Amino acid sequence: MAGLKIQNLVKSFGSKQVLEGISFEVADGEFCILVGPSGCGKSTALRLIAGLDRQDGGKIFIGDSEVSERTPRERDIAMVFQNYALYPQMSVYENMAFPLKMRRSPRWEIEAQVREAARFLEIEELLARKPKQLSGGQRQRVAIGRAIVRKPQLFLFDEPLSNLDAKLRNAMRIELAGLHRKLGSTMLYVTHDQTEAMTLGQKIILLNEGKIQQIGTPEDVYERPANLFVAGFIGSPQMNFLRGTIASEGGKHFFRSGNLSFEVQDKEKLRLYGGREVTMGIRPEALIPGGGPLKGQIEFVERLGAETIIYVKAGDMTLVMRVPADFPKKVGEEAAFSLQARGAHFFPAGNPNY
Amino acid sequence: MRKLTLLERERIFACSLISPCFLFVAVFAFYPIIYSFYLSLHRIIIGLPGLGEKFIWFQNYYELFHDPVARHALGNTLIFVFSSTFCELVFGLIIALVINRHFRGRGLVRAAVLIPWAIPTVIASQMWRFIFNDKYGLVNFVLFGNNVGEYQAWLADPFFAFLAVVVADVWKTSSFAALLILAGMQTIPEELYEAAQIDGANAWRRFTGITLPLIRPALLIALLFRTMDAFRVFDLVYVMTQGGPADSTNVLQYYGYKKMFAEGLMGYGSTLSMLAFLITLIIAMFYLGIIGKGLIRAGVQNETMRGKPGR
Amino acid sequence: MKKICFFITTATVVFLSLLPFFWFVSTSLKTELEVTAIPPILIPAGSLAFYRSSIERYDLLHFLKNSLIVAGSTTFLTVSLALLAGYALARLRIRWRGLIMGGLLAVSMFPQISISGPVWKILQAWGWLNTYQGLILPYVTLTLPLGVWIIAAFFQELPADLEDAAKIDGCGHFQTLFRIILPLAVPGVFTAAILIFIYAWNEFFFALLIMTQKGYQTLPVGIALFQGQYTLPWGEIAAASTIATLPLVFLVALFQKRIVRGLSAGAVKG
């Protein structure tokens, strides 16, 4: 087992610069998620780490050695692909045995390793079958099995759950978390799904347009987003964004946006923004129904069973809120809300869209 | 020496894979073209090696320019190309429309339609030569029945001989044109037709409004391939009419063959072959001008997509 | 109503496509007398005399053997080379990929006459006129474009991450090609082989040129040059033609789906 260190990785394809000098570290045994929207460069970064493409600049370290110039084989890594990449003409057993065969392990050792991995992943009955006879979830497990037989220093996952249906995805997520717990290996996992990132990762790295936006634990990035992008990317439903200004009146601070005006308690957050244009972000669950300074008309109600999401038109903007399932009001009715300071964030005025 | 990068190693690997092909093509295709040009500047007679190979500058070309038979052959070739290509595209379109539907026995129909394409052209030529035969031919029988006195010697008449060659060519290669057009048709999504049906378009309107415009690239490619092939017609003429009667079916490649190998005039024959090559080049460039931009764009798209892996 | 129209069209197309062929087959089964009947007889008596005489007097089996050797060798050689080149062009990063594909396409369009003189001279210089290799080598050159295009198009359909997985599992370039890619290439190779075989079997121009001795001539040349003593031996020609085309008819009937797909693939990608 070993850690991963990336220093200033740069990569362009033709005239398009995909990675603009990213650096991060993954500790030995850590489950790290690289997350971002399509085209942000996360898959490219993964391929560079795997050695499938060559970087234009920067260094890669696995464990104590620099591997920037080495072939994939020499880096001692394993990768699980989005489309599984199982060899169609080989059986499950042969697929899982292949990497060991390439290392010229003795036959008995290969057999032992493959069977152990198969048992671990509960795919022993499938060993004689061919990939096309397997379901999506089974194929994914075989792909994982092929990766773990070699006991590599580093596991790489390239959006492995994207091709599975929602229910299976949830189940596999839990299995992957369990896998990491049992193996204790260093894992780098790439995804565009922020739910996967939040639930699986010990450390999350957010990437956008080839640059790192924030590195932190799930709690870090949710409670203390470093910028507008992170705030808008993490969390579902998406954070509400309002543009306005901060005004200081008599020792109190107010946020003003159009017709809306309300007092903001937490002075720490506002110190830098006095008198300036800001974008205020409000988490849907930070708006509490009942009395309060925010008033608006309910436009749309989504009853999800365990909770309800409502869309309220306040002034000339629509706010999304999370309310308990037994919220009594209906479409067209007026509602009033108050703001919880914890869920309010302030950023320099800008556009959260990506 | 420093260790090679991944990209360099891949390039060397790729080169080693392509080089055998390259070797063949260089020796037996590209070099001969250059050598042909070289030969066309000499007077060479196979069979009289004692005369040697005399360098005569562009005298062969001068001769070619004033050769009425060559001009006639070129004219015949062009008329042949136009008429047969046109017919083949029309028939090919009809065949493609038929095969495009799903029906039981479609495989058999496809096999039946492919047979003319699959058999050697010389055998097809013999077949049609027999069909147009003045005594035992099917055409005479179909047209005149038992009235033997009316039987015509089709292949002895300049006009009908030419027609016969065209008919034989159209018979043989319409199915190939059909396949190319079919490929284009199969890329048209079914939903377009369904939407048109709901909008009230009848079969003819659906054909002219959806099918024809969307198979334009396939039609152009079929046209390109057929034009190139029709221009090279040889087997049919060699077997059916031997260029006659009275040079009415003399075509460029046949005339070139006669001069170069039957008469052994390799220098003059090479001049004819250079002419053939030149015209082919012009046709190709003309077509590339029309379809080329689309092809190049598709090719470039392909390049950039492969260069950027992942999402 | 529409169905009837469709049926009639289809029937007409099939009838016209097969008519000359059936006519020839029927002719081959006639007796000597029936062939020269005027007006022609439509239904033959069913005699195999012409088959016998075409084999005995006109040496048909000999031509058949030559065609098999030439077409078979060409197919084998071309497919092998096209496999390597097709993989390289489809999968590996090559700077002049478009140029190479275009160059191959161009070669397939060269008029035969334009390269025949020099090819003849080269073969004469090497002493390879009237030898098998003298015909096989130009054939390989002529069929390479077809083979490469089909196989390259086929390889492009394979998922790209298979090679990535192989690289990570420890394969070098050659190992990836032989262990992973080649077993998957079989369908594409098969299609290419069929089309190349048909092309090589049917080729006439170069066969006529290079094989002037009867001993080495292939079927198309043999049948084109069938000469009787005073008249054309139509019966024998018909019989020989039937024998020559029967293998092709079987190939087409069995593999029509593949053939259509192979030819269309080239067209759609091209």
Image (spheres, rainbow, N blue to C red):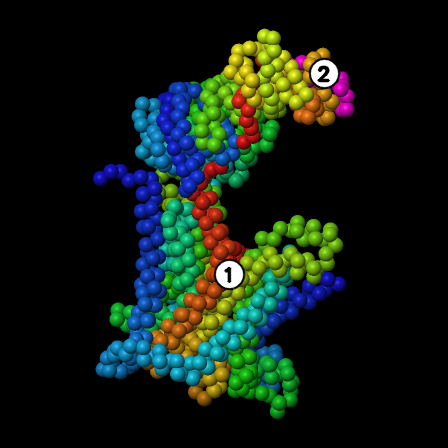
Residue at (57% x, 10% y) in the render: A266
Say which element carries label 2.
strand
Task: Tell me where residue B179 sits by quadrant.
Answer: bottom right
Is residue C138 or residue C179 the one in the foreground?
C138
Say which element carries label 1.
helix
- Decide whether residue B115 is among the magenta residues: no
Is residue C253 shown left or right of residue B49? right
Residue lying furthest top: A251
Residue at (60% x, 56% y) in the render: B214
Task: Tell me where residue A260 sits by quadrant.
Answer: top right
Residue pointed to by mark 1? B290
User: Which chain hosts label 2?
Assistant: A
Residue pointed to by mark 2? A336
The quadrant of the rendering that contains the N terminus of chain C is bottom right
Whether residues under marks 2 and 1 lie with C-beta atoms below 8 angstroms apart, the answer is no
User: Which of the two discs, 2 and 1, sits closer to the camera?
Assistant: 2
Residue at (61% x, 17% y) in the render: A255
* Percent x, y of residue A252: 60, 9
Residue B239 in view of the camera: no
Residue A315 in view of the camera: yes
Highlighted range, magenta = A323-340
Three-letter code, disc 1: Ile
Is residue C105 or residue C190 the one in the foreground?
C105
* Percent x, y of residue A122: 51, 26
User: Which chain hosts label 1?
Assistant: B
- Alpha-carbon neighbours of circle 2 within 10 Å: few (<14), some, or many (≥20)? some
Q: Which disc, if any, is residue A29?
A: none
- Decide whether residue A332 is among the magenta residues: yes
Cα distance, mark 2 to mark 1? Answer: 66 Å
Three-letter code, disc 2: Ala
